[in-house]
Image (cartoon, helix red, strand yellow):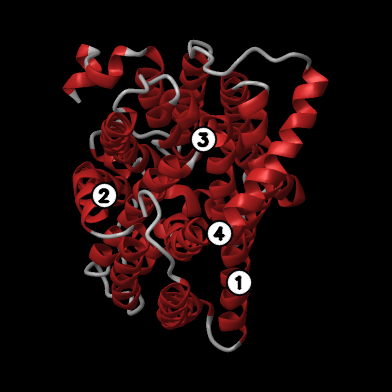
Amino acid sequence: MASILHRSGPFEERNPRLFVWFTTLYNARAYYPILAVFFTDLGLSLDQYVLLNAVWAASIFLLEVPSGALADTLGRKRLLVFSASVMVVEMGVLLVAPKDGGWVLFSLCVLNRFLSGASEAAASGADEAIAYDALPETNRAAMWDEVLAAAMRWRAAGFLVAMTLGGFLYDPSWLEKLGMGIPVDLAHRLPVALVFLQALACLFIALRFEETRRAPRTEGHECAGAWKLTLATAKRALTTRSIAIVLLGAVLIDAVARNFATLNSAYYRLIHLPEWSFGLIGSLIAVGNWFLPAIAKRVNQSLSTTASLIAAGGVTAVLLVLVAPSWPFAGVVPAMLLMMMLGFVSFTVSRFLHSVATSSERATLLSVKGLVFNLGYGAYSLAFSGLLAAMRTTGSDASAFPRALAWQAGGFVVALLVFALFAGALRDRKPPGG
């Protein structure tokens, strides 16, 4: 924390500093603790909301790798400016979406999710690549560990503030007790308005990055090169045994944990928590994420990348089993720990991929990772949406969600065992960083 404020160590360079600010403001969004209930309170069903997440993932599937290749050819700064600009529009759409607006509401929500995916795809890979390549080549890997740890801690601090504000802003009942009541519909838009301001700040930061790649010769030549680089890098990632195994293990955990994270507010309602507490829970998760980099670094230094992911999968399986009973109030503890697994997986995979990537393909390889992650997440969102629908046809609406959670826990345990056996059978020599 102190090194970035004092501009010492790796933060003597501008880009690593800006990367930390950008990733913090981009990711620590005040509407996260109330995301599911925000859409359902607007007038969507839970099934429709889960389908929107699939739209988001499909957007990334279409744009993730091409955007990474364009970042490596046209320029990382250009992609970051585009990403921040789209984020501004994305938040503006939610601000004007009409409550109970029928097909107009659903159409605007679909547009929001598509733009969100496009923004995420453009930033994914480009932000890390522009920071990593700005570091001095001497001791670069160790410096990146420091930058990555600082980014995770600043994001944790950002989430602490954003989650607390998001929960309190969404639920005006605490203001009414102080005699400062505001309309509920207005309160429900306040977290989105706050993220809109963050998007403007991200755009300002993106404009201040210093480009780290060579100047392009011609736009047409570079775009053609982007597609060649996309195909070559994707082929290398998916046919190199060590990279493919790491991506497979990581997406197994990420898809399930991220799907639950997008449904967390619906789960909190299920276990009878008041809405004003949603943000506080997010803040507690942020506090836990503050300590996560040190834990993740120690585990990854002690175990191979694959072994680290299998261990993380084991922890995830236990947490999914504990989440499934939906215990009133007590269920919040495993739910919080489950969402923290996302940070562990992110640190592990980023550390590994930077160790095997060359500078010319760095953003593209990171975008391949993002593509695999979001393809897995999108497929799992569709599967979970279908599971919810199936549970609803065989029981009451109230029982559908907890029954789906129970099926999810059992399915994940089986999938993890299959992956562990598969990774053990295909294990080759330990690659660099893995």
Residue of label 1: 383
Q: Secondary structure at mark 4?
A: helix
Q: Is residue 132 left or right of residue 179?
A: right
User: From the viewer's perspective, is the residue at label 4 or at label 2 nearer?
Assistant: 4
| Residue 363 rendering spot, x and y as whole percentages | 55, 34
Q: Residue furthest bottom?
A: 394
Residue of label 3: 358
Give the quarter of the image for residue 104.
top right
User: From the viewer's perspective, is the residue at label 1 or at label 3 nearer?
Assistant: 3
- Judging depth in this view, the residue of 210 and 362 nearest the camera is 362
- Callout 1 amino acid: Ala
- Callout 3 amino acid: Thr
Are there few (<14), some (14-19), or many (20+) residues within 10 Å of tag 1?
some
- Judging depth in this view, the residue of 320 and 67 nearest the camera is 67
Are there few (<14), some (14-19), or many (20+) residues within 10 Å of tag 3?
few
Q: Earlier in the sequence, mark 1 or mark 3?
A: 3
